[in-house]
Image: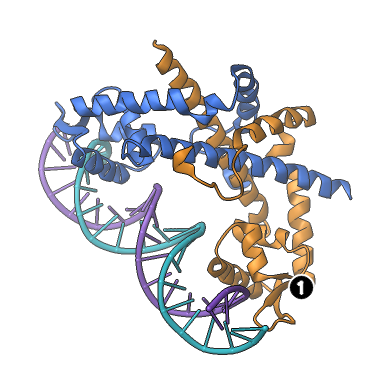
Chain colours: A orange, B blue, C purple, D cyan
Amino acid sequence: MTSAAEGFDQARRVAQLLIGAAECAKADFAAIVGELDLPPNLARAVVALDEPTPMRDLADRLVCDRSYVTGIADGLEQRGLVERVPGVDRRIKLLSLTARGRDVRERVMAGVAGGSVLLTRLTPEQRATLEPLLEALVQGQRTALPDAAAS
Amino acid sequence: MTSAAEGFDQARRVAQLLIGAAECAKADFAAIVGELDLPPNLARAVVALDEPTPMRDLADRLVCDRSYVTGIADGLEQRGLVERVPGVDRRIKLLSLTARGRDVRERVMAGVAGGSVLLTRLTPEQRATLEPLLEALVQGQRTALPDAAAS
DNA sequence: TATTGTTATACTCTATAACTATA
DNA sequence: TATAGTTATAGAGTATAACAATA
């Protein structure tokens, strides 16, 4: 096997493991919050709402568009987990967790802390080893990749 | 901070890094094959076609539905990278790389071997450390997750 | 004029179901 | 009857563009 083919195979193996592990983490989170009848995107939003937050800011935290947050807010409101409360700037609506929402938020966090495969399948030492390697990989990327094609 | 919140934060940090690293790997591959004017799904298929392969088998390799492979084959055929050749069992069509397809396949593999961030941002030692950690994470999952909700 | 949230729409990726031609 | 490939369609997830209210 040529050296180029070896390099390719190494990159492919790591890529597949990385993608598989990420999908595993996503599926794991979906399963945990699924027991609370929450789709993962709503669960992520609930976790992000540590305090009343303008919808625009939530979009920033979730790294998505404002228009997508509208749907998230609708879903959370239907479930009685948040209220839209007007801000002092009357263009702004704050998403504020209800009592039920705060309860669900705690359950989500407890469920992850108690059952996540990231905690159960890796020892603290393994996580401590893993993190800097992943950081090395994503280094040079800010929240939005600045110039992906030119890298 | 309570221990549950600490556990949650640890899981979240690892999850974000994992997902970020996987997205980074995907974007990197897309950028590499983008220079060959290939979308990532077609590039993956070209790489998988080491020899003439029934479309059904390609679906298995790419872990997707037969119907999706039809579109991939159309795209590759339009670009002159594969031919559909009838099999001995006349239900079967083999996807066979053209000369141009074989050339592109080599370019994809060379591009990855030469430029992948998985190779440039990690030393061989780091990759050797990373792999078993990721394997530990995805362990217990067969190709298709058997019972995600019950895990 | 610029910004917030909303709406309507569109796009990407992928699957399901029904169809045909073989076997 | 079962399987290979195709087609049409649908769904999830997310973005873009235009809009009303407010600043």
- Whether residue B97 is visible, yes or no, is no
- Dot 1: element: loop
Residue toward you, B35 or A7: B35
Viewer-side residue, A71 vs B123: B123
Q: Relative to A123, does residue D18 appear above or below in the rendering?
A: below
Q: Residues within 10 Å of mark 1 (few under 14, many from 20)?
A: some
Q: What type is the residue that disc 1 sits on?
A: Thr
Q: Position of residue A88 (x, y in %)?
A: 75, 82
Choose top left, top right, bottom left or bottom right for residue B39.
Answer: top left
Residue beneath the point at 16% across and 28% down: B87
Q: Quadrant of residue A131?
A: top right
Quick check: C21 above or below A109? above
Q: Is residue B28 above or below residue B135?
A: below
The residue that appears at 21% across and 28% down in the rendered structure is: B100
x, y percentage for residue A52? 76, 70
Query: Disc 1 is attached to a residue of which chain?
Result: A
Residue found farthest to the right: B1
Q: Is residue C13 above or below residue B44?
A: below
Q: Is residue B79 left or right of residue A104?
A: left
Q: Which residue is found at the position 32% from the left and 23% from the top?
A: B106
**Residue A115 x, y percent position in the rendering:** 73, 44
Q: Where does label 1 land, which residue?
A: A98
How many tags in the picture? Answer: 1
**Relative image position of residue A17 (x, y in whole percent):** 55, 30
Find residue B125 and report its image quarter.
top right
Note whether residue B61 is visible.
yes
Q: Quadrant of the C terminus of chain B?
A: top right
Q: Residue at x 40, y 37 (%)?
A: B63
Q: Residue furthest top?
A: A1
